[in-house]
Amino acid sequence: MEALRVLIVDDEEELVATLVERLEIRGHSPVGVLSGAEALKRAEAEEFDVVVLDIKMPGEDGVEVMKRLKRLRAGLPIILLTGHMSEETSDRGIQAGATEYVIKPVNIDDLVEKLRSAVAASPRRGGAAG
Amino acid sequence: MNGSDTSGGQRGGLRFFGRMTANLSHEFNNIITIIGEVAGLLDDLLLLAEKGRPLNTEKLKSLSDNVKRQVERGKAVVKHMNFLGHSIDDRSREVDLGVLVENVTNLSKRIAERKGVALAAEPAVEPVVVNCDPFGVMQAVFLCVDAALGAGAVGVPIKIGVRRVEAGAEIAVESAAFEPFGSAEAKLEDAGHLAAQMRAEFASQNEGEKRVAKITFQA
């Protein structure tokens, strides 16, 4: 089973810490950060296979953060993490290039499955999605 | 409802109520999510323990503390939600404005934070009790905050204070972002049942460099 390098971005510190630990237990290599600005710094400094990004964070537009991540790392799959998926958010997310959505509360098995699918479909791995 | 009520005012009240409850549901969802993840992590650790990895008691204590923090956070949300829910019970009753402002501040904090704005209530020195329509006043305070958020640069803080004044009492919402006042005044049109005096007072205050929206209460 391939260990995925996952960047988790959410302003809820305790959620990030717990998700990081649960993904580590499942053999992956997650890194957690608490803001879009931190996410951009980390993504600039190191390679990730996939990003899990909260779409609503204080002072930041998650979709805008996603666009900047995409500019920084073309083809990087991004999974949006959201409390409530409105159509408007969904449309904006898709247009901006989100690969997938995860709605809170998170089901860890679903999340892992979506991480794998997103990475497999990524053009970086020869998939079609971008 | 009094004579100045309009369907616009009712819609404004519903819009306020809707924004507050949507905000609270978001907060609840975050709490539930964290508790769910902690429970999931406990399951993971138990599975590992069954496979021979010893349980770390410090880790268990830390997870238990995390759940307790989320419960406290949930209790605070329930308290503010309850205050909001009961604010429509009476058209007029005795209200401690300090308590009311604390509730509006906590209900609105996440909305402000999403815009990178720190919203804080200044602690009241003493109880300031007036007869008022608590729902209307909460709505008015929120509209002032919303006007500052709409007018303001990201990161400009908002302070809300309550004090006794010669004529009675006032709630002052202070933000350097209030400019022009007209935009904030227009927002108060949403709250059609609020007193005309409140709107006028709101539109006219500008204390030097401080920009303050005031809601006044006569003794």
Image (tube, helix red, strand yellow):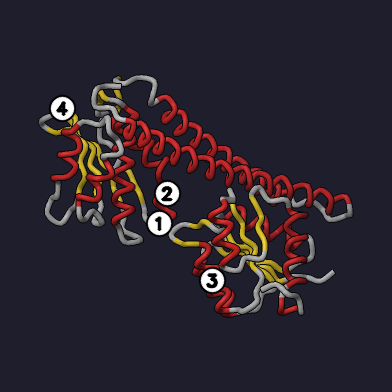
Residue drawn at (78%, 47%) of the image: B43
Image side of residue B218 versus residue A5, left or right: left
Q: Are marks 1 and 2 on the same chain?
A: yes
Q: Are marks 1 and 4 on the same chain?
A: yes
Image x and y of residue A71, in percent = 55, 78
Q: How many marks?
A: 4
Residue drawn at (39%, 51%) of the image: B112
Q: Are marks 1 and 2 in contact (CB under 8 Å)?
A: yes
Residue designated by label 4: B218
* Amino acid type of the residue tagged 1 in the rendering: Lys
Give the alpha-carbon distance from disc 1 to disc 4, as whole Å. Answer: 34 Å
Give the alpha-carbon distance from disc 2 to disc 3, as whole Å. Answer: 23 Å
Foreground pick, B157 / B14: B14
As helix, strand or loop, the secondary structure at mark 1 comes to loop
Image side of residue B63 versus residue A113, left or right: left
Instruction: Between label 4 and label 3, give the one nearer the viewer.
Output: 3
Residue drawn at (25%, 52%) of the image: B175
Residue designated by label 2: B111
* Amino acid type of the residue tagged 4 in the rendering: Gln
Q: Are marks 3 and 1 in contact (CB under 8 Å)?
A: no
Chain on which label 4 sits: B
Residue B115 is tagged as 1
Decide: is B19 above or below A101.
Answer: above
Chain on which label 3 sits: A
* Amino acid type of the residue tagged 3 in the rendering: Lys
Mark 4 or mark 1, which is nearer the start of the sequence?
A: 1
Residue designated by label 3: A67
